[in-house]
Image (cartoon, rainbow, N blue to C red):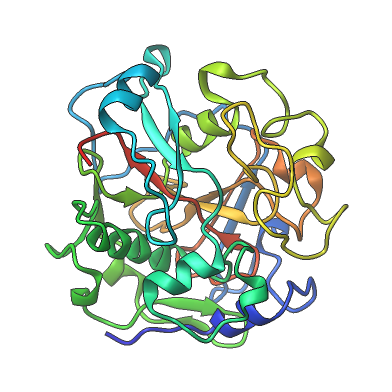
Amino acid sequence: MKRYLYFLIPVVLCACSKNSVRQSVQITELTEPNNASVSVQNSEAEDEVKTVHEEKLSQIDIVSEEEYLALYADTDCSLTKPKMIFVEGNEHLDLSSFEIGETEVTIEQYCTVIGETEFNKEWGKHPIAGINWFEAIMFCNKLSIMNGYEPCYTLNGEKDPSLWKGDLPYYTEADGHVGDISEWNPVRCNFNANGYRLPTKKEWAFAARGGNKSNHTQFSGSDDIDEVGWTEENSKERQQVATKKPNELCIYDMSGNVWEWCWDKMRSDPNDFRRIVKGGGCGTPASYSAISYISSDEPDVQSLYYGFRLCRSIGER
């Protein structure tokens, strides 16, 4: 399988240049048929979109923080075992307890896991960007395998991403669409597996709000974006993770820095491949970093404003 690391060197060697990458989240309508389509909505009033590729949990499992610390918590953290934050579930929201990354996946974490050594160490603590949705789920499975966990994602019966056949689809303004999204779209997620995965839209929003400890702020951890996030108003480029105030659960950068890929499709239409991105970023207005703001993009899009955050279902270590 051919790997495309088109944006790896620009991502790790230089800062985001607002004029050099596609401003997908600011585009509400595109007429060119070969461009990646984008949909931006400013409300989460719509119900969670369920995809035909989702294998749901058999039942809601509300693990308490005490049970988590006693039975499931893993404090052995490293570049190949990122620090995770416990999020207690909520029966009223039909949401099981889960773990989510304390920070966005960083450049040094990403490069260490995929075996890439050519990156600027000074940028190591910055969030990885230029990663499309397919690359994010491949990373999740690879990290799961490295740690002896059951991978969550399966493509055509294979859990090992090195066995996923065909060229990795990607989109850039220079190259357009390369590869066939439809060959990679039938990815299934087993939410009962104990491996790493992307959060669902519901999990992302619940964690960003501070879970059951929420103070109901506009942004993740504050009503003042300057306290918690990097946007185009206070930074034109990505910053090191965890340099702003965390939210109520001690999770950093869920508003701002880079947009974060989620598992969910934007629409249930099988011909609409768009996946949800949340959180806003350094290249967009502060209002886009509100927890309620939702956007989406084609899963093959590589943008210097797109990164991701890890999530895990609660289970055996």
In this view, the residue in front, 36 or 134, is 134
Please tell me whether residue 278 is drawn above or below residue 271 in the rendered image.
above
| Residue 232, quarter of the rendered image | bottom right
Q: Which residue lies at the image location 61% right of the left edge and 87% below the top edge?
A: 174
Question: In the image, residue 115 lies at what x, y percent?
Answer: 38, 79
Please tell me whether residue 245 is drawn above or below residue 238 in the rendered image.
above
Q: Is residue 273 left or right of residue 207?
A: left
Question: In the image, residue 173 lies at what x, y percent?
Answer: 62, 81
Tally of marks: 0
| Residue 12, quarter of the rendered image | bottom right
In this view, the residue in front, 243 or 2, is 243
Q: Which residue lies at the image location 77% right of the left edge and 51% below the top edge?
A: 230
Q: Which residue lies at the image location 49% right of the left edge and 51% below the top edge?
A: 309
In this view, the residue in front, 110 or 220, is 110
Q: Is residue 129 left or right of residue 76?
A: right
Question: In the image, residue 278 lies at what x, y percent?
Answer: 58, 46
Q: Residue furthest front?
A: 76
Question: In the image, residue 282 lies at what x, y percent?
Answer: 75, 58
Is residue 64 visible in the rendered image? The answer is no
Please tell me whether residue 231 is drawn above or below residue 132 in the rendered image.
above
Q: Is residue 282 left or right of residue 209?
A: right
